[in-house]
Amino acid sequence: MCSLGIAATMALTAVQSVLTFKAQEAQYNAQMEAWRANVKSAGEALNDQTYLENTRMEQTKAQATHKLLELQKETLQAQGTAMASSEGGGLSEEMLLQDIEKQRADYSDAIAYNLKNEAAQSEFNKKAMHAEAESRARAGNPGPAPSLGMSLGLGLAGAAIDAYSTYHVSAPSRRGDIKSASSTKKRPPTYPGI
């Protein structure tokens, strides 16, 4: 009878472990699907943000190039005006042309410096976008999948320990009670040598 009870308990535990595993597996699959959607969304957001940052940087470069061309044009006009109005002014004409060229060079250097800083800031922005996307992709990762073997093994091991405790560990105390009940009868004393 005990063996039949143990077998029934083990069978029920196995069925329960399989059903529990199936429920965990369904939940895990749903979490994985949500996580994959999150990873895809993070990747698309990164692509969009990077595209916008690259476009902004290209516009900034085009703007700087346009400023440099305008500066070159203004410099040439100023030099032409200076040469036309001085009519052989000599040293003062040369100084005026040098001053115009120096201003153009200073302004060109400022534009190049600002453009270099914009490019560096753009790279930092892209790194931050990448880190954010990576963080989003890692968030919500459901971890390892549930294991049928582990679920079934732990369930059966638990049932076996429970059955052992129920039928074998507590059984001697019952047997002891039976023996102690039977040992309460008084036996006649035995005398050695009689």
Image (spheres, grey):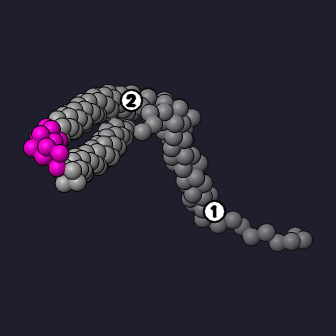
Determine the CA span between mark 2 and mark 1. 57 Å
Q: Which residue is mark 1?
A: 183
Identify the residue position indicated by label 2 in the image: 25
Amino acid under disc 1: Ser
Snapshot quadrant of residue 70: top left
Of the pair 149 and 43, the residue shown nearer to us: 43
Q: Is residue 121 above or below residue 35?
A: below
| Residue 61 drawn at (x, y percent) | 24, 36
Front in this rendered view, residue 8 or 33: 33
Write the residue at 45% across / 37% down.
144
Above/below status of 181 relative to 13: below
Q: Is residue 187 above or below residue 144?
A: below
* Residue under the point 60% across and 62% down: 180
Dot 2: what SS?
helix
159 and 61: which is toward the camera: 61
**Quadrant of the image for the C terminus?**
bottom right
- The picture quadrant where one finds residue 58 is top left
Decide whether residue 185 is among the magenta residues.
no
Residue 185 location (% of width, % of height)? 62, 63
Q: Amino acid at mark 2?
A: Glu
Can residue 91 be seen from the camera position used here? Answer: yes
User: What span is colored magenta in the figure?
Assistant: 77-89
Q: Residue at x 54, y 50 (%)?
A: 165
**Could you say which is closer to the camera, residue 177 or residue 102?**
102
Does residue 114 appear to the left or right of 181 in the view shown? Answer: left
Whether residue 95 can be seen here? no
